[in-house]
Every structure is written in structure tokens, then in C-alpha cells.
Image (cartoon, rainbow, N blue to C red):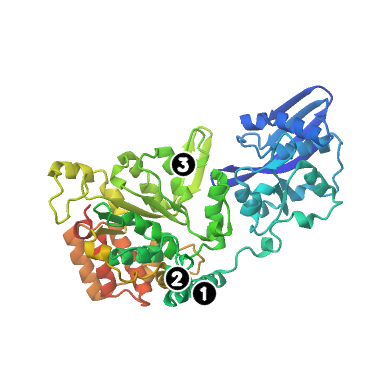
């Protein structure tokens, strides 16, 4: 008897439906075909033990399992459950009253028949409706990451016997469903989402004004209010958050570069449903298990060490299936602290993703594509010792050592940085002052939120296009300059050798500054500030 159960597997950030065909015929063998990896081939022993635990048995016949399409490599432990269900149906040990073509079933089996989490459940559930499935049956450990998926009903069960009960149609399946009405609606529309977030920020501001400044609940964990001084750097962070621009910070050790980078997510707007799906599916494929409601709304923050390998940064590995740090930072921030300590060839790998906002990985087993839509924040010291521009004479670095140190960042890489800023060292007066803290993240986040809403209304998208991702058509339409601004751009371009990429990036930053100031067009002041932030020789040490 032949039985077909439907599962899925991940190829890069995409998913592919896999038909698990189980045939039980006379003979004595257990064969799995369709390019399975070792985890799939070893499923026989887990399945056999699970069936015996609930009073079933592995048929004493020839069992052939085909994973179609047969020309794509299948991996992971998630195929345990569909193979086990297929064996039970094909051998006549259970009767199924429901239409199996409606269900997408995945899960890892323990020896006692309980179900364990498998990687990629969020990505598979998010794409299930696209492939025509109405329901997904997953392990209970996938509950958090699949609880808000829309377009498909997600049932989370604890063991193999509960799957059999659900498929028999004799029990109420509603208590297994984890997303309830959310599968129809998902997250609210952008307007409602932003409205709730705006009220949350205003509530935090009320607590602060009412004397709640010392209350941890009135601040983010990494709040801008905890950073003394550095007002120009905070303005640069605000521009980056509002338009998703890249930022390079240069300054002496201890001037606050890392603190400011860590505070950037606190002033960014919450992720919409589409953005959350794009970011969350990467973590699901990677195998991150700690999911909460904040995991879906807060922009991710990744800060890899400078000793990271090329594959760990951009993704790949031996088979090309693992996402890298640039993909895990999608819709959030990738912070490269001590960027001049990174290997030059590692940094050069970022050039294409910074332009295309995707990374394409080619390996022997196939080609894989992952999103890489992040804000790059880099921090560096001005010289090997870090004290080049301090008032004291602590720096003893030679000019050749400084030149060699800075040459680790190539011209094309620097050309992709929208804002380059020198962060001065703080004096003792700022550090020892007992005055009140500076402007909080909640206050800055309100201004950023207004600027982001302006962009989404302008481009008619919900997070799809921001100022930093404008194409040529949007640039011509929304970034026109007046006569004075054009003359300034011409003078600065000729003096500093501004490239075509640098020219467009200056326009995009100026457009964001205008949005923060509530201006329809780009003024001379906006383009002047964008140019001041642009050139490393004027505003940075690189």
C-alpha cells in the first residue's frame, strides 16, 4: 500500500515542499531514497522505538521511503514524524479520516514517541499557505515561534499518539491549535502597530517626567539617556535609525562607541509582520529556540567578534545551509566593533550584501540565498594604540603604522558608509557631573517613528522601501535639489572626488534629515549636514 505525507525543508531562506512517499510491500528491508542526509537515514531507529512505545510496530516487510523531489538533498530530523505517520497508514495500523493533502507534518521523534523541535519550523509554516496547505502539525516546542503565523492553522502536539488522534478526526483539534484567530490576521497593520508603540513610548516619557527616571521600567536596557554628552553622535544614530543608513564611528577607547551602537535598536521602530517573518525565519533555520513576543517586534542586534571566519559572517559552511551573522542581523543592526581588527578579506565580503541586501552562496550541493538587509554600524580606533587625537601625548604610533592600520578598510568599503563620524573623548567634567541624564531613547524614538511613517506613506509600502533603499526613480522624484544645494554639491564633489555612489548616498541621507525636520523638500541645510557627515577626512579619523 502506498501513502503520501507532505513535509518541507529549507534551502537558504526559502522552503521546498517534500512529498514523503511510503510503500509497504512483500519483502524485508527499510530503504530511504531521495538524497537523504545521515540524520534522515538514522530515523529508522527513532521511528521503530517510537512505534513500539505506543503499541504499534515496524512492518516486517519491505518499506521504501521516497523523498520527492528526489534530486534535492534533504536534511534534518524533521522528517521523522511524516515518515512514521506514513508507515502507520501504509501498513494499515491506523485509519485516517481527514484529507492528508491539507496537512504539512514535520517533527523529530524521541525514543519514547515524544516530539522535539526541528529547525526551520517558522519558515515552513509561513510558506505553507503559499503551497496550498491549510494546516501544519508541529511539535509543541515550536509553539512560540509559530503562534502568530497567519494564513495557515498551526497545531502543536506533544507526542506521536496525539498526532494519530488529531488525524483520526475523533477529537476536538482546536485545543492543539496555537495561533487561533491570529492565523487569519497576523500582526496588525502598520498604522495600528505604530499607534500602540507610540503610546508605549509616551507612557515611558510620562514616567520619566514624573520622577521615574530611576525606574528601570521607564528606560530601555541600553538607553541613550545613559550616555553622557556625544550629542552629535546621537544625532547620527537618529538619522541612521530613521533612514536605515550605515554608520562608521571613530574615536579613542572608552569614548562610548559601543554603548551608542547598542542603543541604536532602542530608537528604531518595531518590526511589522512582514519584517518579523523575514528576520524570524532566519533564526528558526539557524536553530535559535528562545522565542518571545519581543523576539518578533524588536530589531535584532548582532555583534560578532573580529576573529569571526568568512563563513560565519556571510553564511555557508560545508553545505551552504547555515545563515551567517549578516543574515541574522536582517531588519536590525550588525555591529562590527574594532573593525580594523577584522581581516581585510572578511570585510570585503560585505561589499555586495551592502548594495543588494542579499547574500547568494554557491556550494557543491546547490545555491542558497539569504536576506542581508541590515544597518551596518562600525567602530574603530584612529591608530593602533587608539590615542592619536587626544590632547595628551600618549600616542607613539608612527605615520607608517597608522597608514598601514587604516588601509585595512578599502575605498569601496568606505564608499558604502553613509555617515562617518569622529567621536571625541569625554572630559572628566561630563563623567563626574551629577546633572540629569540626557535625552532618552523614548523621546528620540518618537521622532524616528514620525520620519519612518513619512517614508512609508511616501513609498506606499510597509517597510519595503526606506530612504536608504531608494532606486533611481525615487531619487529623481523625492530628492530634487534647489539651485544653492546643487552648487554646494558641485563644489564639494569636485573638491573631495565624490563618487556616483557617494553622491546618491548623500542625497538619501539628506532626504532622511529633511524627514526628521518635517520638510517636504531637501533644503540647503539638509544637504550641508549630509555632506558634513559624509567625508571621513573632515568628520572621522579614517
**Residue in front for this viewpoint, 38 or 16:** 38
Q: Which residue is mark 3?
A: 315
| Sooner in the amino-acid sequence: mark 2 or mark 1 | 1
| Sooner in the amino-acid sequence: mark 3 or mark 1 | 1
From this view, report whether residue 186 is shown above or below residue 101: below
**Residue in front for this viewpoint, 504 or 37:** 37
- CA gap between label 2 and label 1 equals 12 Å
- Residue 227 seen in the figure: yes
**Residue in front for this viewpoint, 12 or 159:** 159
x, y percent for residue 148: 63, 59
* Quarter of the image where one finds residue 146: bottom right
Question: What residue is at 31 percent from the left and 56 percent from the top?
Answer: 257
Q: Which residue is mark 1?
A: 199
* Quarter of the image where one finds residue 500: bottom left
x, y percent for residue 440: 39, 69
342 relative to 147 in the view: left or right: left
Question: What residue is at 34 percent from the left and 44 percent from the top?
Answer: 347
* Quarter of the image where one finds residue 340: top left
Assign a secondary structure to mark 2.
helix
Q: Nearer the viewer, mark 2 or mark 3?
A: 2
Question: What residue is at 15 percent from the left and 44 percent from the top?
Answer: 397
x, y percent for residue 283: 54, 48
- In which quadrant is the N terminus drawn? top right
Residue that protrudes farthest toward the top in the picture: 28
Q: Nearer the viewer, mark 3 or mark 1?
A: 1
x, y percent for residue 38: 62, 29
- CA gap between label 3 and label 1 equals 38 Å
User: Residue 449: which disc?
Assistant: 2
326 relative to 487 in the view: left or right: right
53 relative to 380 in the view: left or right: right
Amino acid at each position: 500500500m502506498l501513502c503520501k505525507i507532505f513535509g518541507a525543508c529549507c534551502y537558504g531562506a526559502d522552503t521546498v515542499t517534500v512529498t514523503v512517499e511510503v510503500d509497504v510491500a512483500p519483502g524485508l528491508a527499510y530503504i530511504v531514497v531521495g538524497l537523504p542526509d545521515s540524520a534522515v537515514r538514522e530515523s529508522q531507529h527513532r521511528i521503530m522505538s517510537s512505534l513500539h512505545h505506543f503499541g504499534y510496530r515496524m512492518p516486517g516487510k519491505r518499506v521504501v521511503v521516497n523523498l520527492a523531489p528526489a534530486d534535492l538533498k534533504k536534511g534534518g530530523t524533521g522528517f521523522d514524524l511524516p515518515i512514521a505517520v506514513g508507515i502507520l497508514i501504509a501498513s494499515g495500523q491506523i485509519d485516517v479520516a481527514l484529507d492528508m493533502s491539507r496537512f504539512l507534518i514535520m517533527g523529530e521523534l524521541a525514543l519514547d514517541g515524544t516530539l522535539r523541535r526541528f529547525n526551520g519550523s517558522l519558515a515552513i509554516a509561513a510558506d505553507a499557505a503559499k503551497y496550498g496547505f491549510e494546516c501544519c502539525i508541529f511539535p509543541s516546542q515550536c509553539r512560540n515561534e509559530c503562534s502568530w503565523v497567519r494564513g495557515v492553522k498551526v497545531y502543536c502536539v506533544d507526542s506521536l499518539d496525539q498526532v494519530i488522534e488529531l488525524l483520526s478526526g475523533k477529537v476536538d483539534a482546536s485545543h492543539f491549535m496555537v495561533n487561533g484567530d491570529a492565523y487569519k490576521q497576523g500582526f496588525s497593520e502598520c498604522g495600528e502597530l505604530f499607534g500602540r508603540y507610540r503610546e508605549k513610548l509616551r507612557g515611558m516619557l510620562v514616567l520619566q517626567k514624573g520622577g521615574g527616571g530611576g525606574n528601570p521600567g521607564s528606560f530601555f536596557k541600553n538607553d541613550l539617556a545613559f550616555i553622557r554628552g556625544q550629542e552629535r553622535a546621537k544625532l547620527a544614530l537618529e538619522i541612521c535609525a530613521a533612514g536605515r543608513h550605515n554608520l562608521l564611528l571613530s574615536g579613542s577607547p572608552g569614548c562610548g562607541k559601543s554603548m551608542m551602537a547598542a542603543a541604536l535598536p532602542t530608537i528604531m521602530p518595531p518590526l511589522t509582520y512582514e519584517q518579523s517573518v523575514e528576520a524570524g525565519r532566519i533564526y528558526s533555520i539557524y536553530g535559535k529556540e528562545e522565542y518571545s513576543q519581543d523576539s518578533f517586534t524588536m530589531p535584532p542586534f548582532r555583534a560578532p567578534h573580529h576573529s569571526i571566519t568568512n563563513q560565519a559572517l556571510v553564511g555557508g559552511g560545508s553545505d551552504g545551509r547555515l545563515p551567517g551573522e549578516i543574515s541574522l542581523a536582517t531588519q536590525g543592526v550588525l555591529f562590527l566593533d574594532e573593525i580594523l581588527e577584522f581581516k581585510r578579506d572578511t570585510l570585503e565580503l560585505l561589499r555586495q550584501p551592502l548594495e543588494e541586501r542579499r547574500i547568494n552562496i554557491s556550494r557543491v550541493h546547490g545555491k542558497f540565498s539569504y536576506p542581508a538587509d541590515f544597518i551596518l554600524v562600525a567602530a574603530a580606533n584612529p591608530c593602533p594604540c587608539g590615542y592619536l587625537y587626544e590632547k595628551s601625548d600618549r600616542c607613539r604610533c608612527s605615520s607608517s603604522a597608522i597608514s598601514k592600520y587604516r588601509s585595512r578598510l578599502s575605498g569601496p568599503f568606505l564608499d558604502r558608509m553613509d555617515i562617518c563620524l569622529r567621536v571625541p573623548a569625554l572630559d572628566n567634567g561630563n563623567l563626574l557631573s551629577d546633572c540629569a541624564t540626557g535625552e532618552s531613547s523614548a523621546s528620540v524614538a518618537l521622532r524616528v517613528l514620525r520620519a519612518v511613517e513619512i517614508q512609508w506613506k511616501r513609498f506606499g509600502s510597509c517597510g519595503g522601501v526606506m530612504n536608504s533603499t531608494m532606486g533611481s526613480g525615487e531619487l529623481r522624484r523625492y530628492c530634487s535639489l534647489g539651485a544653492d544645494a546643487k552648487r554646494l554639491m558641485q563644489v564639494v564633489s569636485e573638491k573631495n572626488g565624490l563618487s556616483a555612489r557617494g553622491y546618491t548616498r548623500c542625497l538619501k541621507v539628506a532626504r532622511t534629515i529633511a524627514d526628521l525636520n518635517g520638510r517636504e523638500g531637501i533644503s540647503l541645510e539638509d544637504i550641508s549636514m549630509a555632506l558634513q557627515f559624509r567625508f571621513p577626512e573632515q568628520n572621522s579619523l579614517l
